[in-house]
Image (cartoon, rainbow, N blue to C red):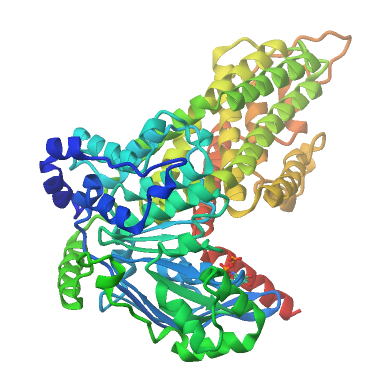
Amino acid sequence: MSNVPLVRRAIAGAALAHNAAAVQIPMDGQENQWTPAALERAGSTLKALNRMAKRPPVHILFEDISYTVNSHKGEERILHNVSGEFRSGELTCILGPSGAGKSSLLNILAGYTSNGVTGRISVNGHVRDMRVFKKLSSYIMQDDLLQPRLTVLESMRIAADLKLGKELGKAEKELIVEEILQTLGLWEHRETRSERLSGGQSKRLSVALELVNNPPIIFLDEPTTGLDIVSIRQLVVLLRLLSRQGRTIICTVHQPSASLFTLFDRVYVLAKGMCCYQGAAPLLVPFLSEVGHVCPTTHNPADFVLETLLGDGESAAQMTELCQNGKLCRKLDRLTTRGGRKPVLHSDESIQRIFGEHVAKEQTQKMEFPTTFITQFSILSKRMFVQTKRNSISLWIQLIHHVTSAVLLGSIFFGIGNDGASPIANFKFCLSCLVFFMYTYIMIPILLFPMEVRLIRREYFNRWYSLKAYYAALSFATVPVMFGLGVLFLVITYLMSGQLLEWNRFILFSVIGLMTATCSEGLGLAIGSAFSVTNGSIMGPALVSPLLALCCYGMGFGPYIEGSMKALMSASYLRYGLTGLSLALYEQRAYLDCSMEFCLYSDPRLLLRDLGMTNDHYYIQIIGLLAFTVVHRVLAYFALRYRLTAEFSNKFLSYISKFLKHR
Ligand SMILES: Nc1ncnc2c1ncn2[C@@H]1O[C@H](COP(=O)(O)OP(=O)(O)OP(=O)(O)O)[C@@H](O)[C@H]1O
């Protein structure tokens, strides 16, 4: 990490600063203390964040940005050649009526959306290089979710381990974590699980997590949505303090109150995809007067501008023309806006010089992420184990599901395992075990994974770790529960159904059962990555039903299965599972006991012949299941990768609309 020496340097005076640290943002009920002057004073004593704020200031300029999407109505233009700039040391608010294109603009500036975008974005005078920009910026999305069963402190420690790497020692990371939490008023809630935090605390934790590596630019989409007035104020006050340390902070806000509006340095107003104003917040009212809309002194300027824009299209067009669609910025003397304090902003030349050096340094760095694959894998696996362990309700449900299903199957097929009179029933037992593993392990990821995708979206976009490391950890973390419960199910059913008590048969039977579960889980992950819970719940069963039909085909007339059908059957991974289970029970086995006068299938070879499995080998079934497991998991990886980028839904919709148009 290139900021590590900076942080190290910053931490050199740790003991001193530790004592002086942690000016808390006044919480609940103390909001009236937050006059702008008080904020400035507090900002200068935020030791932890000040010390870390040594990364290059970032100044974003964007010109003629247009954004087009393909929807069912055809091509739709969301943004129309908008321009503007956002500067270091300023808190900027993007305002506008619903559907104006605020989130779209933020997504484009943060680099989350690039498909269908034209125009130029430069960072400190250089064309934006996404590889470098992503290391400098953090994006906190509107519907960000936190890891629910981790405490505030655990979440922060994991963020520090992932984002600061190994070059910083444990003590140094602890110091950073503590000071950020103190500053954000979360220290007293450090042992609270994220799922139990209030809305305002959750938002603050989202910000805290992204502050760990001290990004010079932070984007926030609707950070105030769903918060009460006190929490909103606390959050905006915090953002203002952070901007005062030289950060560029840009957020979209729906309808700020008058007192909240005064906390923003810069306002960017959008309506119908066009810029209607950009510049200093206090200059918005004079600007509106210029187009004939005099804001009454008792009125909130933010409300007034929204009412004006919603009133008639003419005012919006006039405003767009006057500000040249964002090219003209209304500037205020910075010394005045900052209450006489020296501005944090650097001159353009110094910004360019610092940034140029920083870019060169970042580019020479080989590592795309702050930590190695192995470190990411071990941190993420540990986090998943902790989450699984703490989700006791889910564990209990799974345990009860496995045990009751096993007892039910064992009772239905009780003691038939070695009876030559009921081998078909025993074959059905194999089929039932197969169906159990298939449905259970397909449905769990289909139902749970879409939520997980939402959980990791911010972390993945903000480059906490690589998708490969996450995916490897995910595949690994489910193994203990699956194997533990799977073996329990197999032991119960195997014993109750009276199968031959031979270790090797039980192991061969179990290996196939567990491999079917692993393979099905891969398919479930692929479906869960690509679809929502609702669509996935339809897709899953719809997809496996034909696979199930193919796997059972030929029962009773095995020797007469047509070649083409055999080829089709080999495309169903369930066929390998069913054959593997049957071979585990019947291959190389002596005649079965016969409880009746005549048992047609006392000779197990006859049974395998009529099932069409005479020429099959156990190891081929293992290879088949392994191959399908790899295919499913690779599919799931790519589905997840596409899902985690905003482009996916755009592309998907555009294909659908093109398809419909051509019909
Ligand atoms: N991928 C897309 N496909 C189709 N339409 C889209 C897409 N993305 C955005 N839009 C449309 O673009 C317009 C602007 O959307 P955007 O989310 O940027 O608005 P917004 O100003 O943030 O609105 P709100 O304040 O309600 O969140 C909306 O009409 C939305 O339906």
Residue 584 x/y as whole percent: 62, 24
Q: Residue at x 56, y 33 (%)?
A: 515
Count of marks overlaid on the render: 0
**Residue 38 placement, left or right of 561:** left
Q: Could you say which is closer to the camera, residue 436 or residue 122?
A: 122
- Determine the residue located farthest toward the right in the rendered image: 597
Q: Is residue 554 left or right of residue 636?
A: right
Q: Quadrant of ligand 1?
A: bottom right
Which residue appears at 49% of the width and 81% of the height?
Answer: 275
Residue 465 in view in this figure? no
Residue farthest toward the front in the current orientation of the protein: 297
Above/below status of 99 relative to 500: below
Asked whether 596 or 387 is in front, the reply is 387
- Position of the C terminus, as image quadrant, is bottom right
Residue 519: give x, y in percent of width and height: 57, 39
On screen, residue 361 versus residue 549, left or right, reads: left
Image quadrant where residue 21 sits? top left
Q: Position of residue 357 (x, y in %)?
A: 15, 68
Q: What percent of the width, then of the height, locates residue 109?
A: 41, 70
- Residue 212 sits above or below residue 614 on the image: below
Is residue 97 placed above or below 38 in the rendered structure?
A: below
Compared with 102, 582 (above or below) is: above
* Viewer can see residue 267: yes
Q: Nearer the viewer, residue 349 or 520?
A: 349
